Amino acid sequence: MKEEVRQKVMERFSISEQAMQLLLESAEMMSFVPKDIIVHEGEINTNMYILSKGIWRAYTFKDGTEDTFWFAVESEIALPVWGYTSGSPSLYTIEAVTESEAYCLSKQKLEILFQSSVQLANIGRRILENFMLEIETSWLSS
């Protein structure tokens, strides 16, 4: 992971160098090309992705029209919320817009990390807090 991306992730989620290293050691590096589907709508995906390069988008179809509702860029986390929190199928598709690289952590690995460190457990809380803020911002701008 590029040092500037690593620093942004550490700042955004207030984690130490040691905690960041634990996350990366537990993750699998994945590469994507434009139009690759990371999560299919209707699929159960319980992974968390730390985007280290590229742009992703999330979209769904409403009344037959494709509706993009968020983008993720390097140093951001993408998480199919329904799959991760309840093991339910995703209500949207996540697609690579550009050539991308991401660190993928399974829910099982994350749970082990969260149990081993309060600092790491706080990452999960911060991700959900950010998600709630984005939802409220979206509601207010509609």
Image (spheres, rainbow, N blue to C red):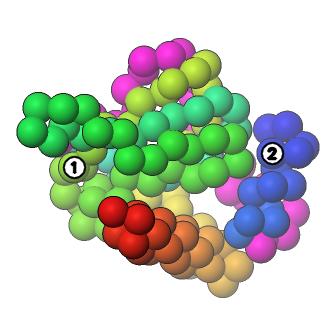
- What range is drawn magenta here? 14-42
Is 134 inside the magenta-drawn segment? no
Asked whether residue 58 appears in the rendered view, the answer is yes
How far apart are labels 1 and 2 at the CA level?
Answer: 29 Å
Q: Quadrant location of residue 100?
A: top right
Front residue (pair 8, 119): 8
Q: Is residue 75 left or right of residue 31?
A: right
Pointer 1: what residue? 91
Front residue (pair 136, 16): 136
Residue found at x 74% / y 65%: 12
- Is 141 located above or below residue 99 in the figure? below
Q: Amino acid type of disc 1?
A: Leu
Q: Which residue sits furthest bottom?
A: 118
Count of numbered marks: 2
Asked whether residue 49 appears in the rendered view, the answer is no
Crowd tier of the residue under label 2, counting other residues whose Cα lies within 10 Å: few below 14, some 14–19, many 20 or above: some
Pointer 2: what residue? 5
| Quadrant of the rendering where the N terminus is positioned | top right
Name the disc covering residue 132, or none: none
Q: Position of residue 29 (x, y in %)?
A: 63, 33
Residue found at x 69% / y 32%: 53
Q: Amino acid type of disc 2?
A: Val
Q: Position of residue 58 (x, y in %)?
A: 39, 41
Q: Is residue 61 left or right of residue 71?
A: left
Is 26 inside the magenta-drawn segment? yes
Front residue (pair 64, 118): 64
Residue found at x 25% / y 32%: 66
- Is 51 located above or below residue 125 in the figure? above
Q: Is residue 3 left or right of residue 36?
A: right
Q: Position of residue 46 (x, y in %)?
A: 36, 53
